[in-house]
Image (cartoon, grey):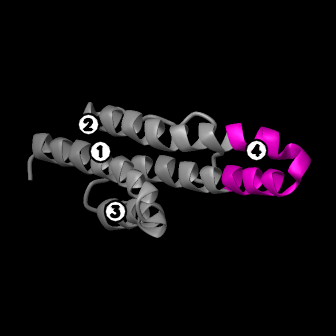
Amino acid sequence: MSVADTDKDTRLWGMILHLSLLLGHFTFLVGLVAPIIIWQIKKNVLPGIDQHGKNAANWIISLLIYSAICAALFITVILAIVAIPLGIVLAVLGVVFPIIAGIKANNGEYWKYPLSITFFK
């Protein structure tokens, strides 16, 4: 495989990895597991995928933490007024951020999700 083919494959699989996060809006676990599986399978074949996988995993974990905080706020009736808009913002970011990351990956760029907590460097 030539360097150009490897770069092309890295860009394609990076985009697929990020866009697979969108599956979480249809089937919860698939959207969380698919990017991790793609990352683990492809990182040894395409070393450039490793950073994409780390960025996506950091976003997944961060989004789960933020969602848990929203759920806890929602349970307390007084703070439900805050939790509902935050939940809507998280839902929008859960769609917009993977699309941006997928486009950047297809262009050969790495994109760190804003508001993402760094667990994997």
**CA–CA distance between discs 2 and 1?**
5 Å
As drawn, the label of residue 121 is none
Looking at the image, is mark 2 or mark 4 earlier in the sequence? 4
Label 4 environment density (alpha carbons within 10 Å; few <14, some 14–19, many ≥20): many
Please name whichever residue, 2 or 114, is drawn nearer the observer in this view of the structure: 114
**CA–CA distance between discs 3 and 2?**
15 Å
As drawn, the label of residue 38 is 3
The residue sitting at 9% across, 47% down in the picture is: 2
Q: Magenta span covers which residues? A: 65-85
State the SS at label 2.
Answer: helix
**CA–CA distance between discs 2 and 4?**
34 Å
Contact, mark 2 vs mark 1 (Cβ under 8 Å): yes
Contact, mark 2 vs mark 4 (Cβ under 8 Å): no
Residue 116 visible in the current orientation:
no
Residue 14 visible in the current orientation:
yes
Q: Nearer the viewer, mark 2 or mark 4?
A: 4
Q: Which residue is mark 2?
A: 106
Q: Which residue is mark 1?
A: 15
The amino acid type of the residue labelled 2 equals Asn
Looking at the image, is mark 2 or mark 1 earlier in the sequence? 1
The amino acid type of the residue labelled 4 equals Ala
State the SS at label 1.
Answer: helix
Q: Which residue is mark 4?
A: 83
